Each structure stands twice: as structure tokens, then as C-alpha cells.
Amino acid sequence: MKKYRLEFHLHTNYSYDAVITTEDLVKARDEGKFDIVCITDHDTAEGALEIKGKNLFPVIVGEEITSADGHLIGLFLKETIPPNLPAEETIARIKDQGGLVYSPHPFDFRNLGLGKKIYSLVSQVDIIEAFNGAGDFFCRNHRAKKFADDYHLPGVAGSDAHFPDEIGTCTTLVQAQCIDDIMTPKGLLSSLDDCDVDAQYHSIFKHAVEQVILSIKNRGWRVVKQGFRFK
Ligand SMILES: [Fe+2]
């Protein structure tokens, strides 16, 4: 069996608040920061599909979808799922595509996750993000970890990287005979039966300042009025 390092939660420059390029990902992979990357841009799978099509490194196509009830990530998607649908409908669309349902930062204190809603949806969630790179203060990771343990769901780590230096800061280590064994929904889930996390939180202050500047640049001052509800 070999060990593989998964980056579960990462935004490229297809997200309005991130700058990571394909070249940044090639460099990070070559530096051993991940073996497999889930590309999870905000409300679009287009960048993930395009980068996967280049066959430069193993990519799981994902999307961080802004549902009406909080953020949800679909993994192994074939096409973009629109935002602002109820969580139930968003989950149904992920499953229709044969994908996995990943709950990012479920107890984020800015209500960017599912929050209490997760208790009614738990039977439909496949993976819980128990360690988000933004740390315990913002994401209440300790509560997410307890939730994953209580409900016997895999509790994994995701960097939530938006900038090149954040790639691979929170990763999940799994074992498999070969990488292809992990590149299917069923294979990935079974590899998570026995996994380890390697989580180092990135600098919240630096991340917040960079993200505010970039979001205002790309979306204008309305993001300020919305109270910086992005991530
Ligand atoms: Fe994210």
C-alpha cells in the first residue's frame, strides 16, 4: 500500500476571491504538497473541468456551492451546480451526478457552513471537513471534529486555499494500492476508513486582508455591504 496526500478544498483563479493558477498547482505538486487535489471553486466547476482536462496531475472535480442554507461542496462533479438552491436540492443535484457530498466548515461562526441544518441532512452527507485551514476560531473545527466522530463520518482536512502559499497546508493522508483506486467516489470513501490529517492553519490575518482586497477588486464595494460573507 502507498500513502497519498489529498488536498480536499482549494480555490483557483476561477473563484472571484482566489489567485491560484495551474502553474502554482504544478509547482506545489512537484514540491510534494499534494498528490491529488480537489478543485472546489465558488459556484463553478468550469476551472476544475478545464484543469483536469490538461492531465497534469490528479484532479477531482469539485465545486463549493453557495446553497440557500450554507456552503456545500460536491466532489466528482461533471458540471456546475447553480447557487442559491435549498441545501436539499443542492445535495440531490450532487447525487444525480454520482458525486459525493462534502460539508465544508459546517460550524463556521459566520454561518458560512450548514450550521444546525446539518443535523437534518446528516444521512446525506458523505464527508465532514473537521479541519479547515482558516483555523478553529473562524471555523469551530473542534465542533466539526466532534460531529464527524459522533456520526461516524470521515473527518478530513481541507486547506481552503485561495493563495499559492496556502496550498497543502491542511491535507488528508490515505492509503491505497495505486492512485486510481482513490479517484472514484466509492474508492475515495473506502480510503477514508483509515486516514490521517496533517493540518497547519494558515495566517488568518494575512488571508483575510488579501481576500478582502481581491474581492473588492473583482466584485466592487458591494462585498463590503454584504459584510465580507465570502470564503
Ligand atoms: Fe472554500
Image (cartoon, rainbow, N blue to C red):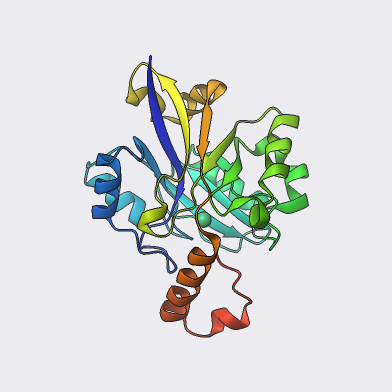
Q: Can residue 110 be seen in this snapshot?
A: yes
Task: Return the x and y of residue 17 as percentages of the image width and height.
Answer: 44, 68
Q: Nearer the viewer, residue 227 or 42?
A: 227
Q: Position of residue 42 (x, y in %)?
A: 48, 60
The quarter of the picture where residue 15 lies is: bottom left
Name the image quarter holding residue 181. top left
Residue 113 visible in the current orientation: no
Q: In which quadrant will I find the C terminus?
A: bottom right
**With respect to residue 215, does 160 lie above or below?**
above
- Which residue is pictured at 35% across the width and 64% down the height? 19
> In the figure, 167 relative to 216: above or below?
above
Q: Is residue 44 left or right of residue 59?
A: right
Report how many numbered discs are placed on residues in the image: 0
- Picture quadrant of residue 110: bottom right
Residue at (49% x, 55% y) in the render: 81
User: x and y percent of residue 118 in the render?
Assistant: 73, 46
The x, y position of residue 152, in whole percent, is: 69, 27
- Choose between 53 and 206: the one closer to the eye: 206
Image-based side of 86 in relation to 39, left or right: right
Tell me the quarter of the image containing the N terminus.
top left
Q: Nearer the viewer, residue 184 or 199?
A: 199
